[in-house]
Image (cartoon, grey):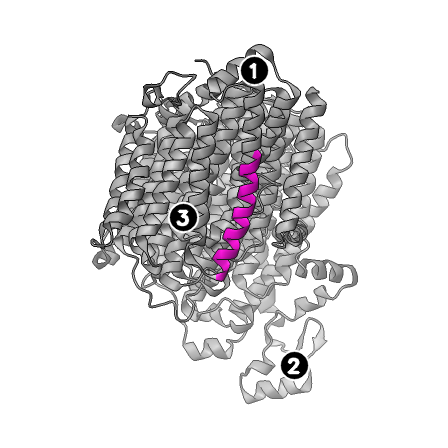
Amino acid sequence: MIPLFVAIPLGMAFIIPMVSRKLTRAPDVLGNATMVCLTALALASIGRTGIYHMGGWETPIGIDLRLDGLSVLLLIAVNVVGLAATLFSVDYMRLYTSKFRYYSLFLFMVAGMNGVVLTGDMFNLFVFMEIASISSYALVAFGCEHEELEAAFKYTVLGSVASTFVLLAIAFMYGMTGTLNMAHVATKIASEGMSTPLMFALSLFLCGFGLKAALVPFHAWLPDAHPAAPAPISAMLSGVLIKAIGVYVLARLLFNVFGITDNLLQLLRWAGVLSMVVGGLLAIGQWDIKRLFAYSSISQVGYIVLGLGLGTPLGLVGGLYHLVNHSIFKSLLFLNAGAVEYATGERDMRKLGGLNKVMPLTGGTSLVGSMAIAGIPPFNGFWSKLIIVLACVQSGHYALAVTAVVMSLVTLSFQLKVQRYVFFGSVRAGLDRLQQIPGLMAAPMLILAVLCVGMAFLIITGMDTPLLIAPAADALAGGFFTL
Amino acid sequence: MLDVLLNPMVLPVTIPVIAGFLCLLLPKALDRVRGFVAVVAAALTLVAVWPVFRGGNQVADLAGWVSLRIDGLSAFVLLATAVFGLLITVYSVGFMKGKARLREYYAYVLWTLGASLGAVMANDLVLLLILWGFLGITLYLLIGIAGPDAADAAKKSFIIIGGSDCILMLGVVLVWVKTGSTRMDGPAMALGSRVAYVAFLSFVAAAFAKAGAMPLHSWVPDCGEKAPVPVAALLPASLDKLLGIYLLVRVVVDLFTLDGLMKGLLMLIGAVTVLFAVMMALVQHDMKRLLSYHAVSQVGYMVLGIASGTAVGIAGGLFHMLNNAIYKSALFLCAGAVEKQTGTTDLDRLGGLGKAMPLTFAAFVVAALSISGIPPLNGFASKWMVYQGIIEGGRGGRLWVIWLVAAMLGSALTLASFVKVLHAAFLRKASPDVARKNVREVGFTMWLPTTILAATCVAFGVLVHHLPLPYLIRPAIGASVDFTGVWGAGPATVMLLAGIALGLVLYFLTSARKVRTCQPYIGGEVMSEPYIQGVARGPSRDVEVTGVDFYQTIQDLPLIHKMYDLAAKKVFDIYDVGRGTAMYFIEALRKAHAGLLPVYLTWVMAGLLVILYMLMRLWG
């Protein structure tokens, strides 16, 4: 079952362009069918663990795919959000041409992300990361207009810098330990300790994956790239990509391969707080809806990294729970922005207004998303923020708790800015007779909004923590990988 | 699950919440029924609250951490909340008739009611936090219903309320970690450490934001002006006040043990709130905005009473909260009646309503005298207790004189500002706008609640020792209340009435027939010639005497002038101050993000160097 997560999307990415010359509906149907399969697989893998040896080769020679609690969590986030994005794409992507290229690139990206979160081999991880990254560069540029191309160029340059750092780091690591298998590296480091070249490799890793995760000061590409992409891709990029190939890998390497230390935790906390504050403040000043959401992603990733950086069991749970929650509400918000753009052709909030009257479903779901991201009860974002703040206080980091609370207030204010200028207020001239949002675009928004409430309900009744979050946190807290 | 929902203590929450969904789902054809459903639900809620109120102290641990508790304090607030919920729902039926978005309106009102009742009963800090946050959302949506104009007020209110909710979260977490429990019936936390102070202030901030005390008050006037009147009456004037003050009492009495420093701080905030808000009220031209500033000002009295830490002070604070909810909702509902009939609440464009709307006028007069603390009405009774609390709590110190003077001065200024409203809206000649409209009294669903409330003002004032104190207030604080100064409401009322009667007799006997004619003057100033001629020619906008102008002179007084200038610049509005501060940092950050790739690459390299340095130095 484990290799299917990579094999299915990778295969379909090649099949779609081949068949769609004749069958014009094929990209939509096949793309969505693939994501349905993957979502089902991801849900079926809850509670499972296992190691798959690729091609039947034993560990030192072949490549491992490792499935554990943390991978399951990420797989679910990636594929559920992916499904919502493909559903949304059916109608939304009519705004663009050559759908088959779009779906093909999309599935490459999904295959890359699924591969990254499953693989147990450093070089394999690099390859999957590049698959996901390069297809995302192309997807950002998909509109082929000035703005998209400029954003994609910046994204590509900084992304390549990240990839180079990672490759260099892998080379150092291989040189020092003689192996690329994460478990082997971990065993080696656990028994022999760190050396200066390994330390250098670790710095490069932190920098490279920090770039992918868009942590301040490595965040500069994100506010350009995420708004420029088509809305469902923005949802994927902000919702899951920065986490799957950024935060996840950072956590994996620090906790399970290099071994976490107090200093590293401190580094994570600083990066988290810095991202939280800088991203949040910058978001207030924006007038482009998607750009505002993009900055808020930087801020929210800060919360996740802060939670992980506390290193306590509760902190890990909070961080990972926030990771899942953020992927739900941020992709919801980007889809809302997409629906607004689809109906009005406008992303500038100053030219919008009163859409609640015209697009009640989009308005309603975006209110849910906004409340969730701002941490207003009873939505899911409230619970993860509560846990993070609780973990901060519990571990004695009072200043961090206060910062997290204040940034929560900041988040609320810029989300209300969106509500105020896009959905409340008086209807702008020309916006009163808009076309209806097609059902297939409405459905994913509705599903994600229900999930915002559902995830909260699950934690209130104590169901999803043992099911999803606790195994993931245990996987990190378990320390060095073992064979 | 079902047995939890039908638990007698949960029923007051379940009924309105379910009825809210019902109102939301009823088809448009049944719009007439919607209001009826809401009224029935609110009435049933009151019926469900009654046994809980009578049931004495009880704790219900329902499921996991969901725990409810009833004690004297919550029973009292619970009953008050349910009663006001019902009154306002009844009023809404008349006021909201024919308006848009009724479906959502009734749903949000009922959910607000349910969540408020839940919050009052919550025995768990996390449960309280959830309901508190949920109330913020419904408030936001309710203000938003008023239409496009209210969008900014809705945003501002929710940023302050929602923001205070975030701060409450910090307080809850601090208490949780420090005491190891989130139950509210546990031992009180001692103040003294920095953490305890922060926790205490977080709770107080949430209570103040909800109740509308300074410096978190600035959403109240905006909300009062823009939101639909029943919403303004329901939320900032009554329910939110009940909740905010409830939380304040809980925090001061049950959750923490107050120390001198915090007590002084709270007293200061109370005194400043009383004075500053009433000064702002004096110069308002919009009736609803003026009333909203009073809604802020009155909170100051409650804070003064509660922060005094004495039994009589706390009892006075709670009693004042109840009285304020009564007369303030009466005032708001009267303002709503005026708005419904004339289409405006701008004092410059009203007048002559005393004759046109006698019932509304009568209710307004009673409520206005009550809020100004005129004996024998209820506002006086509670202020009297608050004063005693201030004196008694201040024994040994000197500061109490300041608080007492502030409170009394505030009371006088309140009266001054209501004289203005009474004149401008009711007593003076009808403005051209009003004259044209042929204004009549409102329908009974709208005047009934106001007159009932006004009658309650009288009853609670005259029968203070027989009705409210023994049945509501004493059980609420659970301790005996000692009065240092005795106020015999009954004899005093008789004396007052006798005095008035005597005055009337004298008037008719002596001066009634001796009429002196002189030049018209206002506020001690003789009116100019064009005015006198204008009056002769019939009413017009230029020659009106609205009664508002006189108060302009207050604005021009030397020191006070400066204060009003600063207020106009929104220096006292924490919302604008916060926004300005944030914008300062944002501008700096935005300048750094100019979109230059080389700059971004430099950041990356700098980041790498910092990481390298840290790792190498720390482990090297």
Image quarter hosting the N terminus of chain A = top left
Residue at the (35%, 30%) spot, across then down: A458
| Above or below, comparing residue A405 to residue B102 in the picture | above
* B366 relative position to A341: left or right: right
Q: Amino acid type of disc 1?
A: Ile
Magenta span contains residue B615: no
Of marks 1 and 3, the one in the foreground: 1
Compared with residue B41, is residue B539 higher up or lower down, i.e. above or below?
below
The image shows residue B423, relative to residue B179, as above or below, that is: below
Which label sits on residue A233?
3
Q: Are marks 3 and 2 in contact (CB under 8 Å)?
A: no
Q: Residue at x 35, y 60 (%)?
A: A95
Circle 1 sits in a helix, a strand or a loop, which is it? helix
Of marks 1 and 3, which one's residue comes earlier in the chain?
A: 1
Q: Determine whether label 2 and label 1 are within 8 Å by CB.
A: no
Q: Is residue A141 left or right of residue B284?
A: left
- SS label for mark 3: helix
Q: Position of residue B199 (x, y in %)?
A: 61, 30
In the depicted structure, whether residue B282 falls above or below residue B137: below
Mark 1 to mark 3: distance in Å? 38 Å
Residue highlighted by disc 1: A189
Q: Which segment did they paint magenta?
A: A146-165
Depth check, mark 2 against mark 1: the one in front is 1
The location of residue B125, given as percent across then percent down, is: 49, 28
